[in-house]
Amino acid sequence: MKYIDRNGRVKSEETEQDRMLSWLYSHRIGREMLKFLVRPGLSKAGGWFLEQPWSKAFIAPFVRKNQIDMTCYQEQEYRSYNDFFTRKIKPQYRPVEGSEKTLVCPCDGKLSVYPISQKGGTESSFCIKNTFYTVSSLLQSDRLAERYEGGWACVFRLTVDDYHRYCYIDDGKKSRNYRIPGVFHTVNPAAGDVLPIYKENTREFSLLKSRHFKTVVMMEVGALMVGRITNYHGACLVKRGEEKGKFEFGG
């Protein structure tokens, strides 16, 4: 996968995990295995395992392998691997910068941006790699989808070494949370090349009637193993940069 880092440098990477997932999604035997792997029950079982005290043994090897600078995070005694996975960062390492009209990045991750247009003059859609998505299929609402024709879809892909908490992009009035049940494909590009993962995976979204960017849809998409979406608030007033929720292991 190629991407541009925050300093403008073009980077390319392919891990052992990338190669394994590519095999699963591109070979017949792998796709048969996926019918079991993407079920919510498996992610739920994995979440239970990683919430047990003995899972703390995985923390130190993971930190070493991914060269994570733990001085950036709040000091605490982790109860489990999942507790470590949802660790909180020190505020000075994620400052809210720019003027009020700056669109705040809601989370860490690799960002792709897609224009939302009309496919064949019918539904508002956008294309990720070779896969077309209609906005109505993501939101399961034709009425909502009509609002976003001519807009932009910002897709943030988090990897396991990223900070897994996310925040509000602007001041505004938040709606209640809408949950759409589904399966748990990986969000690795290997899956996105062959399947419409963002409309098949379990996801949750809310509408933010923002101060500077009209009404924004903020959607969280669960992934293989990391399928538990924890949003803190129902309908309420929120502040720019305020923590909205977190992803956890589980289903």
Image: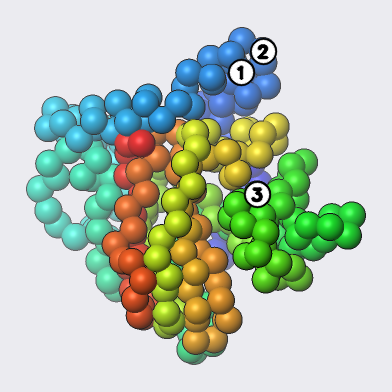
Q: What residue do we see at 17% from left, 38% from top?
A: 80
Left or right: residue 23 versus residue 46 is: right
Q: Residue furthest top?
A: 29
Instruction: Work out whether 104 lies above or below 143.
Output: below
Q: Label 1: which residue?
A: 31
Badge 2 is on which residue?
Answer: 28
Question: In the rendered view, would you say 67 is above or below 235?
Answer: above
Picture quadrant where residue 177 is located: bottom left
Residue lying at the far right of the rendered structure: 120
Q: What's the distance in space between the residues labelled 2 and 3, CA to CA?
A: 27 Å
Residue assigned mark 3: 137
Query: Residue 89 at x, y = what percent?
Result: 27, 61
- Do residues under tags 2 and 1 come within 8 Å of each other at their CB atoms? yes
**Residue 92 position in % (x across, y down):** 29, 73
Q: Is residue 225 rendered to the left or right of residue 153?
A: left
Q: Secondary structure at mark 1?
A: helix
Q: Earlier in the sequence, mark 1 or mark 3?
A: 1
Residue at 62% of width from left, 33% of height from top? 191
Quarter holding residue 6: bottom right
Under circle 2, the secondary element is helix
Mark 2 or mark 3, earlier in chain: 2
Q: Secondary structure at mark 3?
A: helix
Q: Nearer the viewer, mark 1 or mark 3?
A: 3
Q: The C terminus appears in which quarter of the rendering?
A: top left
Q: Amino acid at mark 2?
A: Arg
Q: Which residue lies at the image location 65% right of the left edge and 64% below the top edge?
A: 143
Q: Which amino acid, mark 3?
A: Ser
